[in-house]
Each structure stands twice: as C-alpha cells, then as structure tokens.
Image (tube, helix red, strand yellow):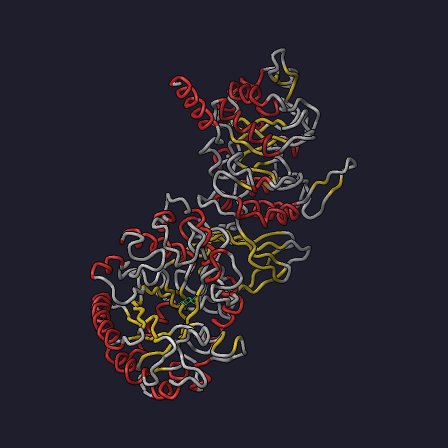
Amino acid sequence: MKRLIILSFCFCFAIGAYSQKWEKVGDRPQMGWNSWNKFGGNISEDLIKGIADALVETGLRDAGYVYVNLDDCWHGERDADGFIQPDAKRFPGGMKALADYVHAKGLKLGIYSDCGTATCAGRPGSLGHEYQDALQYARWGIDYLKEDWCNTENVNARGAYKLMSDALRAAGRPIFLSMCEWGGNKPWQWAREIGHSWRIGPDIWCNFDSTRVHPQGFTDVGVMQCIRMNEPLRAFAGPGHWNDPDMLEVGNGMTVNEDRAHFAMWCMMASPLILGNDLRNMSAETKAIITNAEMIAVDQDELGVQGLRHTTVQGLEFWFKPLAGGDWAFTILNPTREAVSYDLNWQHFNLIDTEVSRLGTHFDMRVYKIRNLWTHQDEGQTLLADKVWRTIDIPARDVVSYRLTPVSTKRPTTAEQLTGRLQRLMKKGIMFGHQDDPFYGLGWRYEKDRSDVHDVTGDYPAVMGFDLGGIEVGDEKNLDSVPFQVMRREILKHHARGGVITISWHPRNPLTGGNAWDVKDKTVVQNILPGGKVYGVFQIWLSRVTTFLASLRDEQGHPIPFIFRPWHENTGGWFWWGRGLCSAEEYKALWNMTQDYVARALPYNILWSWSPNYGFAPDALETYPGHDRVDIIGLDAYQQRDGEQAFISQLKKDLDTICRLARDGKRMVALTECGFQNIPDPTWWTRVLLPQLKSWPLSYVLVWRNAGHRQYFAPALGTKDADDFRQMVRDKKILLLEDVKK
Ligand code: BMA
C-alpha cells in the first residue's frame, strides 16, 4: 500500500511537471526570420547559414531578430527507429551542426513540423511521433517549433497541440511552440496554456488588401485581411501567448508605403515579427523598415497588450496601443488608395481600454510628448484644448506612427473640480438627495422626467443615487429592476442638468451565488482576495463594474465626475463584507483592490465615499481605508419607528466621531443614506431631521428609494409628510437642484 502511494505520488508529480508548456519562453512576441514566404520549399544548409550571417551583418540580430526558422521541406525520412532525419542532400552537415553554427552567431534555430500524417508539402508529419520528434529537436539544439495543420483528418486540434506541447516539455529543452492551426478551431480560446503563439487565420501573401484563392480551394489573405481577423482577438493575447496574424512580407514586393504600414500594424498588434524576405539582398528602404528600433520597441513592449482600433474617420483607422510606464503608441493607418489630410484634435481620442489593460489616454487631463516613430523627430506636445493640433498627411496605404510619453501637468482633475464644487456648496447649505429618483415613485414607473421629489417641490433633488447591484454578473437590470441602459441615460441627464451623482453597489455573493445579504458563509472576502477561491471570478466582476463606470461620459466623451460608495455599511453584519464576516485588514484589502482596479481605468473623475452604518463600535474605525483613499466619509443612518430619541442621540455620537476623523484628514462628510421608512411622522422633516442637518458640516443627505407604498423614504404626491417636506426645502440651507446649478 505504501509503495503504491509513493508510486502514484511520483506519477502525479511527473504529470504535474510536464502538464504545462515551457514558461518564460515568448514573454515578448517572437522575432526572427522564416524561409517560407520567400523561398518556399527550396531551402538548404547554405541558405540558412547565409541568412544567419546576414542577420548578424545587417544588425537585425541586434535589433532583436534572433530566431532563424526552417519551414517545410527540410525533412528526409524517418530512420529505422522512427526518428526523423533531415534531407541529406540539402542539409549534408545535419541539424546539430546547423544549430551549432546558428548558436555560435548568437541566434536560435527553429524548425517546422505538422500535427498530421504529412506536412503541407508532403514530408513526414509528427502524428504518432510527437515524443520522438520533440526529443530529436531537443538533441539537435532546436529552439523553436512551428507546427502546421495539414493532413489532420480526424485529429483533435487541442489534443494534438497539447500532445506536442507536453512532448516538448518532456524533451527537456525550452522550445517556443508556434501553433499554425489557421484559426479554424479558435485556438485563442484554448491554447493559452499550450503554445506561445497561434495563427489566427490563413496564410498571408504578398499583397496589401486582397485575397487569393488557390485551385485546391484554400485562400491566402492580404495585410488588411490579417488585421481585420486579428482585431477582435486582442483580449486573448498577452505575454507568452500571442495572436499570430502570420509572418511578414516586408521586402517581398509590396510598395515601400505598404511595407511600412504592414510592419507598423504588426507592431501595433504585438504580433510576432518573423521576417520573410531575403536578408542577404535587400533594399535600403526594406532594411530601414525592419530595423526601426522605435517601432520594434512598440511591438516588444513589456506590457504585452495588443493594440486597438479606436475609430475610423475619413477612411483612416486610428490605432492605439498602451505601453509600459504610461506611454501610448498611436498609429494612423490609411488603407485607402488616396492620400488623406487629417486635422488632428487630441480630444477626439479620449479612450479607456476597458477590455484589456484598463489604461486610458486621458488627453483631457494629461499632456504627452509626441515622438514620430518613422521620422524619429520630436513633434511637440499634445493639447489639452479642444482644437486642432496640426494637419497630418497620410499617404495612400501608409501609416503615421507616434509614441506618446506623458509629461506632468497641474490641471485640476474632474474629481478635484467636483470636490471644489462640493466644498463651495457646503458653505451654502446641505444638498438633498434621493436614490433611484428618476425611475419610479409612488404609483408610477418610468415616466419621462418624473420624480416624486419634483412632484412635491417643483424641483429635482440636487443629488441622485444609483445602484450597480447585478452589473457584476452581467445582468441587464439592477437588483431593483432598473435597466442599466436607462440608468446610464439618467445619470448623464442629471449630470447635464447640473446635479451630483452618487453610485453604490450591492453586489451578489461571489462565493455562494446569493445576494449581498447572504452572510451564511463567513469566508467570502477572504476568498475574493488574491489567492482566494473566487479571486478570478471577482476580477471579472470588477471589470464589468469598471466598464459600466467608464461608459459614463458626457457628449464630448469626457468621463463625468461622480461619487462612488462601494462596500458600504460594513460596520453592520448584514452584507457579506460586514462586521464579523471579515477582519479589518481583509476589508481594507477589499477596498484597496476595488479602488486600484477601478482607478486604473478612471483615475481622474471619481470621489470615493466610505460609509459605515451608524451605531458602529469604536473599533469599527479600524476598517477606515485612510485619508489618501477616501474623499467623503459618509454615515448611513435610518430612524426606526418610535426611535426618535435613539436616532438623534446615535446620530450625534457617530457624526461627532466621523466629523472629527474628517476634519483631521480634511475630508468631507455626508449622510450617504438616511430616512425614516414611509415617514409615519408628518413633521419629521422639519422637526427631527432639519435641526440635525443644520448641526453638522454636511455636504449632502440622501434618502433611499421610493420602492412603493410599502417602502419609501421621500415624499410623493399625497403623502402626509409632503407639506412638511416642502417647508424643509424652503429653508435656505437645504439645497435642491436649482440651488446648486452652476
Ligand atoms: C435596500 C432595499 C432593497 C433594495 C436595496 C438596494 O435598502 O431598498 O429593496 O434592493 O436597498 O437598493
């Protein structure tokens, strides 16, 4: 029995060790040369040596092109034991000697095989010989394998590539696995752990914008077709696992403009840069393109994010690629047959890459130094002003490419502007706010421009509250049935009319699938933090929240300022992030993770509000994330039936504590949730609440939603507190929308 345990342990270990592709290979898109595009099957030892020499002499090796890759037709027969041998006529010295030659030059050798019975040119395929082939490659000193997909009837793509990946791993030599499956089985969906790059479509041919159909029925594609196919796949690529739109055709017969566009776009897409021309004999223009170090740096950037097309205007495509350190690569691609003049206004390109990097250009907030990547000239700085920077001429089928590097600016951010505004308004009075105000009220739902507060007072609340609960799981409506589309519209509308926006979030429970109030499991927070069981799920939840928040932009495309109030009422025990359900350290880690995630995409427009529930224990303040992470310290405080005195005294106690904390850190204070459900006391507003509001330096008070006659917090037409509410808002200190409009 014991023996069996040891044996099975060893077995598991062996599987574990070989069940992953080679790591630390392909952390940047691979660079090198391959024989196919120029020479097809007509290859030999001499050619490869000559190319290796040329890589060194031309400076291409030093520019990063280190792989010298044989494509199809290097093969001879398998020997009696089944080991593949090179074609002895073409490679008389053998593969080991060739690898030694290449290695001595500081280069690496790549080889080619096929998942099927035979390669595309009919040479022996690897099917059934995967471990033997991998072993042979390792013995020869091979560094790279391109594995093709011809003659694979009844072969499962994922299984076939996994088998070769495992075989390479088992052979013991780190070998880059370049999967050449042509995209038919969508390898981007499953090959991340198997190979280091995968082809996304058919073979390229030396043509800018058309396809060619072979008599056998297969199709070659041009540069533009490759770009179109690659564009939607950017989320699948990253360090160690790249989309491959196929090898380069630079220098093989397109015009210099087309070659430049082709090369620039491969760099913008973080594509493999595998040259396909005759390096022993190339024009100065070709050499200048493929050795453009500043362009190559865009491709090889350590962030490893594939670029995105922001817009197409006047036939021009505007491509952006986020780079490490806050830089951006920016390429204007003109795929048309006419030169185009374009008036460039940086403000038209305020984008946030919510899909992959969460980085934004923020041209409205940041100034960048502009470096032309083809003329290698500095061209000044981007403009914060909404006006044309200069007119750019982009020749037909060509590109203009820039690298943008942020330079510091002192411009007040929209969050700072909102802070300033809230501080000014505090001198005037306290804003009144209402949750879900524009969606529904007592006896009505979704009537254009209607609001219970407006019905009663003739004015809208200064502050409107909205809740994201449900967005994290991709729901179309929030937990209170408000469609997110409608929510976005009303948020933008309230912003446009001069109101203040606050957003809360009652997320579901990522561990149990229950709602925010599901507190049966006490390990939820722990499990969404790094290393936890549902960390990955929660990252997706954060990305959905961020994508929605990033969509809150005004007509000019600028993110609107708002107050975000996640993880509220954590000093009570009713939400899964509440007291007794996580430690203070875990709570703060949750806060920080959320904030860091969202703020990477939206660093300039959010004020963060931390809102404990009143009646908190003294040690509850240990969960305060800190003055550097909180802009508004809120308190959520509801009066209970017959609890007037308790409400007043508790409010006094807690606001005293909160205000002291806020004063120390120069933060603002608000009653971020408040109310008396169904307002049974018709004098509550003026008699109980108003004196409280006037006793404290508050920015705003927000009452909760008017869900229906069974649960409402604001007055409506016909409620018995309506007159009293009208009287309260007549007080100069209570501000509705008209009082706060700019
Ligand atoms: C609660 C109640 C719930 C609602 C939740 C989020 O206080 O109003 O009905 O789902 O807030 O808005």
**Taking 330 as reference, is 120 left or right?**
right
Residue found at x 55% / y 54%: 319
Q: Regarding ligand 1, which quadrant of the image does it lie in?
A: bottom left
In the rendered image, the vertical position of residue 691 relative to residue 138, given as above or below? below
Tell me which residue sits at (46%, 54%) in the image.
Answer: 543
Residue 610 location, x and y as percent?
A: 32, 63
Is 515 located above or below residue 740 in the figure? above
- In percent of width and height, residue 148 lies at 63, 31
- 262 sits left or right of 741 in the view: right
Residue closer to the observer: 328 or 588: 588
Q: Residue furthest top?
A: 80
Q: How many marks?
A: 0
Say which quadrant the C terminus sits in.
Answer: bottom left
Residue 666 image offset from top left, x and y in percent? 24, 68
Please tell me which residue is depicted at 27% across the width and 59% down the height of the picture: 624
Residue reaching furthest to the right: 215
Q: Quadrant of the N terminus?
A: top left
Across and down, in percent, residue 187 comes to 59, 39
Q: Quadrant of residue 53?
A: top right
Can residue 2 be seen from the camera position used here?
yes
**Residue 737 falls left or right of residue 143:** left
Q: Quadrant of residue 635?
A: bottom left
The reply to whether residue 495 is in sight is no
Question: Viewer-proximal residue, 548 or 181?
Answer: 548
Judge whether 301 appears above or below 691 on screen: above
